[in-house]
Image (spheres, rainbow, N blue to C red):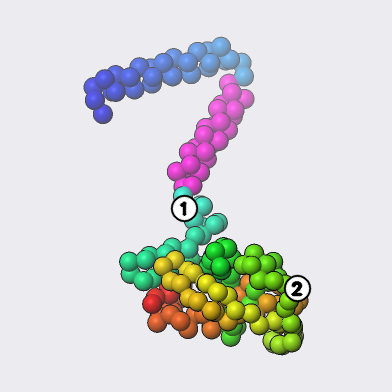
Amino acid sequence: MTSLDLGHLAYLLLLGAVLVFWVFVQNRDSLGKKAQAAAAWGLIFLGTVAAVGLWDDIRRTVLPQQAVIAEDGRIELPRAPDGHYYVTLELNGAPVRFVVDTGASGIVLTRSDAAAAGIDLQGLAFFAQAMTANGPVQTAPVRIDRMSLGPFTDRAVRAYVNGGEMEQSLLGMSYLQRFDRLEISGGTLVLER
């Protein structure tokens, strides 16, 4: 701080002290209520300052983002508050959000995600069957022309469209095994090629 900044700060502190003194002198009869109000406003101010100061940490916790580190050939996915790992891939140029599911053998798309990726839902034949935690479901095999995650692009990727209701598309082992390394450490899923 320069001497001019210190002078401004001293002036503002003196002005603030005079204003506080004036408020207390004018309201001698109800000092208890004024002190309570001042304490409440002080806590509101401190809470606001804390929230602004911690906003990046709060946002990272509530809405974790995937990190693509292209030069190392590495993808880092933070664990979401619900305990799962989510990743957004481009399917034929359309962004599709997946839940990473190491218990699923393949890639399973919801109908809406398949439509977003340009797959014709009317021409699908739901003749395949998959076993889920909720029992068997009908699926339709499809091929995704182009599937990209950061710097990695795969072509003619086999997937399935779920015939039933499903909240989120699943990214299973048929895609995850394309990576040389898959590791979960410290709340982060690391994929490397």
Q: Earlier in the sequence, mark 1 or mark 2?
A: 1
The quadrant the C terminus occupies is bottom left
Q: Position of residue 69 (x, y in %)?
A: 38, 65
Q: Is residue 169 left or right of residue 121?
A: left
For residue 4, what is the image quadrant?
Answer: top left
Mark 2 crowdedness (10 Å alpha carbons): few <14, some 14-19, many ≥20: few
Above or below for 78 versus 47: below
Closer to the camera, 145 or 128? Answer: 145
Residue 25: % across, % down? 52, 13
Q: Dot 1: within a 10 Å radius of its alpha carbon, few (fewer than 14), some, or many (20 or more) residues?
A: few
- Amino acid at dot 1: Asp
- What secondary structure is marked by label 2? loop
Q: Which residue, given by chain and number where applicable, does mark 2 sit on?
A: 122
Label 1 residue SS: helix
The residue tagged 1 is 57
Quadrant location of the N terminus in the rendered image: top left
Q: Quadrant of residue 99?
A: bottom right
Identified at 32% across, 66% down, the residue is 71
Q: Is 179 in the magenta?
A: no
Kind of residue indicated by mark 2: Gln
Span of residues in magenta: 31-55
